[in-house]
Image (cartoon, helix red, strand yellow):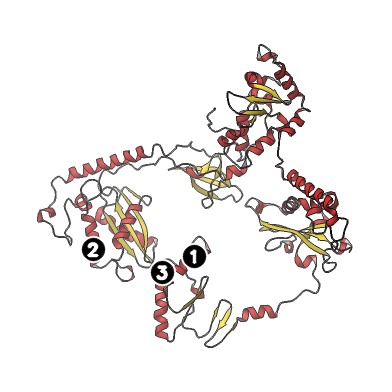
């Protein structure tokens, strides 16, 4: 489909490029041109290829057919007067063999009902997405997983299910998905377990039949008083009960049940620590010193004057702010998970929490919960750029030069420029770039201006842009530079004053103006006696420009700590911008580049510091011993991140 990033984008560009081309039929990326004669067809194809070359379209040579009376196009064989399906399609239909009796082996599925015998009335299948691995003595696919849940409507024995009779088993639910990059490396047993777990999660409301009111209600054939053919108007009470049960079951199974004040009160009545806090707040009998209080009440000692009791629950109020419920330890993890359901940052979570809830160390717990969220860590925004590494300004002509390749009109050019004077050299590479051709042209340039001390390909964007402006509409046939237009365009550039300095590249390089197509006084062609002084002023201007760049980028860039070999890092995907990969730094290169051994493949990838991020804990994933730190550990300073497994980002306390 060409070098573009997506097939749709390539097709659209192709359509826009040949929209004015006559006598054509196009389907996706296949194009048919028709003419009445060989000469007309030749120039028609020439125009088509020229348009494609200018638009950057890439075509397959093996699919090209010229001046044919018969051709295969979009599945049909076209001749001068008629058309018919291609022989390939006819042969595929003619030789298709229908199996005598479909079986589990024919359809390449593995029935999970043999593994899960506790689900009466249901069975589930694991169906690979593309090509099953059963032919390789394996029961899962390296490309994806899927499942099919079917319900039995017949009374046939389970041994012959689901192909026992027509209509005996009907589809209840099905689903499939591709594997993640990490899941593609699973062993066969792990892949089978993954398919079973995913099927049970997606189809959880359909299992357990009679014992699950929600599954019974969602079924196409629920267990009710009447048969499917009878009316159910007399079952309003039962149907209402089933709908309520289904709603409750869905909330409980999703792990996102709503926590209200009654639920907090119910759990608080069974918590002796919380009841001790209620008693102490109600009586107001706090000890003179914190050390005299029981260990479970010490975290609340510093805010005892902000606590109150309302309807059996302790509340926290600061000034004229919100009345916040004091959450007991058993519910803090669920509250933190509820605050992070929308995957907000720490600041947003704290703003929402300070409207409703409070517990000692809440800010640290929410920071910990956010830092251990794998989904947020993967989709975190890109890091801000670091300060620019500026090359020291050159001291003399052609000391520091840049070179790069330029593509224009399907032709390749070599661009060479001097950083001090802006002098530009352009060479044409007729049949593409090769190391031999580039070396030959650079050798000729070095013999005229001398070998540079530093030649770089990074930073030649301005030179390439200028060269493209000069060559546009001035090159000869096949991109040749051997014509008057290119020569005059280059002379005009050499005599044009630079943006800063009030001097031209020709004056900086030769000390005078060059004779071009614009008339000027003869004294301008004489060598300037203050040539050396002009070069020194140019050097001072470049140094001043570097200083301005540093000053402008001071508030927009941020320095990051250097990484050492052996450091574990997260790697940002350059296409999705997600931090979905990890690896280990093996080498440190100049200019903030690092060689990273990628996890999984083991290949060495060269990345810049901006695409590498230190994980919050060694190994790439935060190590969590307890989902929510205890109250005593928060106040005593023995949090898990204080033991070397976690490092907090800089967060301003409020």
- Mark 2–mark 3 contact, CB under 8 Å? no
Q: Residues within 10 Å of mark 1 (few under 14, many from 20)?
A: some
The residue to which callout 1 is attached is 10
Mark 1 vs mark 2, foreground winner is 1
- Asked if residue 645 shows in the view, the reply is no
- Location of residue 183 in the rendering, given as x and y in whole percent from the top left corner: 66, 52
In the rendered image, the residue lying farthest to the left is: 522
Q: Sequence-wise, which precedes: disc 3 or disc 1?
A: 1
Q: Along the horizontal axis of the image, is 250 left or right of 64?
A: right
Q: CA distance from mark 1 to mark 2?
A: 37 Å
Name the disc covering residue 53, or none: 3
Q: Sequence-wise, which precedes: disc 2 or disc 3?
A: 3
- Location of residue 652 in the rendering, given as x and y in whole percent from the top left corner: 52, 29
Residue at image point 80% right, 67% down = 103
Q: Secondary structure at mark 3?
A: helix
Q: Nearer the viewer, residue 491 or 565?
A: 491
Q: Sequence-wise, which precedes: disc 1 or disc 2?
A: 1
Q: Residues within 10 Å of mark 3 (few under 14, many from 20)?
A: some
- Asked if residue 457 shows in the view, the reply is yes
Q: Nearer the viewer, residue 99 or 398?
A: 99
Q: Secondary structure at mark 1?
A: helix
Residue at image point 62% right, 79% down = 88
Q: Along the horizontal axis of the image, is 160 left or right of 65?
A: right
- Location of residue 250 in the rendering, given as x and y in whole percent from the top left corner: 74, 47
Q: Nearer the viewer, residue 70 or 148?
A: 148
Name the disc covering residue 487, or none: 2
- The image shows residue 483, relative to residue 81, as above or below, that is above
In the rendered image, the residue lying farthest to the front is: 233
- The image shows residue 143, relative to residue 50, as above or below, that is above
């Amino acid at each position: 489909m060409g070098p573009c990033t997506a097939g749709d984008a390539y097709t659209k560009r192709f359509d826009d490029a040949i929209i004015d081309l006559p006598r054509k039929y196009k389907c996706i990326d296949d194009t048919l041109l028709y003419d009445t004669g060989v000469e007309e067809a030749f120039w028609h194809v020439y125009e088509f290829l020229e348009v494609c070359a200018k638009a950057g379209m890439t075509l397959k040579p093996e699919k090209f057919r010229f001046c044919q009376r018969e051709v295969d196009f979009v599945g049909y064989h076209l001749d001068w007067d008629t058309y018919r399906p291609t022989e390939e399609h006819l042969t595929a239909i003619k030789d298709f063999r229908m199996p005598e009796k479909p079986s589990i082996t024919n359809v390449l599925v593995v029935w999970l009902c043999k593994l899960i015998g506790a689900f009466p009335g249901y069975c589930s299948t694991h169906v690979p997405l593309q090509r099953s691995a059963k032919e390789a003595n394996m029961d899962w696919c390296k490309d994806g997983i899927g499942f099919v849940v079917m319900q039995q409507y017949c009374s046939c024995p389970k041994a012959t299910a689901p192909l026992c009779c027509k209509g005996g088993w009907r589809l209840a639910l099905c689903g499939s998905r591709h594997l993640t990059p990490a899941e593609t490396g699973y062993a066969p047993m792990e892949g089978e377990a993954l398919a079973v777990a995913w099927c049970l999660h997606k189809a959880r409301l359909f299992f357990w039949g009679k014992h699950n009111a929600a599954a019974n209600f969602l079924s196409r054939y629920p267990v009710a008083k009447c048969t499917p053919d009878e009316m159910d108007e007399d079952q309003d009470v039962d149907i209402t009960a089933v709908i309520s049960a289904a709603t409750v079951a869905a909330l409980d199974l999703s792990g996102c049940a709503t926590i209200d004040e009654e639920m907090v009160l119910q759990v608080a009545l069974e918590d002796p620590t919380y009841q001790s806090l209620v008693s102490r707040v109600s009586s107001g009998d706090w000890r003179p010193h914190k050390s005299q209080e029981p260990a479970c009440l010490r975290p609340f000692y510093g805010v005892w004057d902000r606590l109150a009791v309302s309807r059996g629950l302790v509340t926290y109020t600061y000034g004229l702010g919100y009345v916040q419920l004091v959450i007991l330890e058993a519910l803090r993890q669920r509250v933190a998970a509820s605050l992070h359901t929308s995957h907000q940052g720490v600041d947003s979570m704290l703003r929402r929490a300070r409207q409703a809830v409070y517990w000692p160390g809440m800010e640290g717990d929410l920071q910990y919960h956010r830092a251990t969220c794998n989904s947020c860590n993967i989709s975190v925004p890109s890091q801000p750029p670091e300060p620019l590494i500026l090359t020291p300004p050159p001291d003399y002509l052609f000391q520091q030069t840049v070179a790069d390749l330029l593509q224009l009109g399907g032709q390749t050019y070599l661009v060479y420029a001097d950083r001090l004077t802006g002098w530009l050299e352009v060479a044409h590479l007729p049949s593409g770039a090769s190391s031999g051709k580039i070396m030959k042209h650079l050798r000729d340039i070095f013999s005229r201006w001398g070998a540079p001390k530093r030649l770089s390909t990074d930073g030649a964007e301005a030179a390439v842009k200028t060269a493209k402006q000069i060559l546009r509409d001035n090159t000869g046939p096949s991109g040749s530079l051997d014509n008057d237009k290119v020569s005059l365009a280059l002379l005009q550039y050499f005599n044009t004053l630079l943006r800063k300095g009030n001097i031209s590249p020709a004056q900086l390089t030769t000390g005078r103006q060059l004779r071009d197509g614009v008339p000027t006084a003869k004294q301008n062609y004489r060598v300037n006696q203050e040539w050396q002084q002009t070069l020194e002023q140019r050097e001072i201007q470049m140094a001043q420009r570097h200083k301005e760049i540093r000053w402008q980028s001071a508030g927009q860039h941020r320095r990051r700590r250097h990484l050492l070999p052996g450091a574990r890092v997260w790697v940002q995907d350059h296409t999705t911008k997600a931090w979905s990969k990890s690896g280990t730094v093996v080498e440190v290169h100049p200019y903030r580049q690092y060689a990273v051994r990628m996890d999984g493949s083991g290949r060495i990838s060269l990345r810049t510091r901006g695409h590498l991020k230190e994980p919050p804990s060694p190994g790439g994933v935060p190590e969590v011993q307890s989902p929510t730190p205890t109250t005593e550990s928060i106040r005593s300073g023995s949090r898990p991140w204080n033991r070397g497994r976690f490092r907090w980002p800089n967060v301003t306390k409020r």
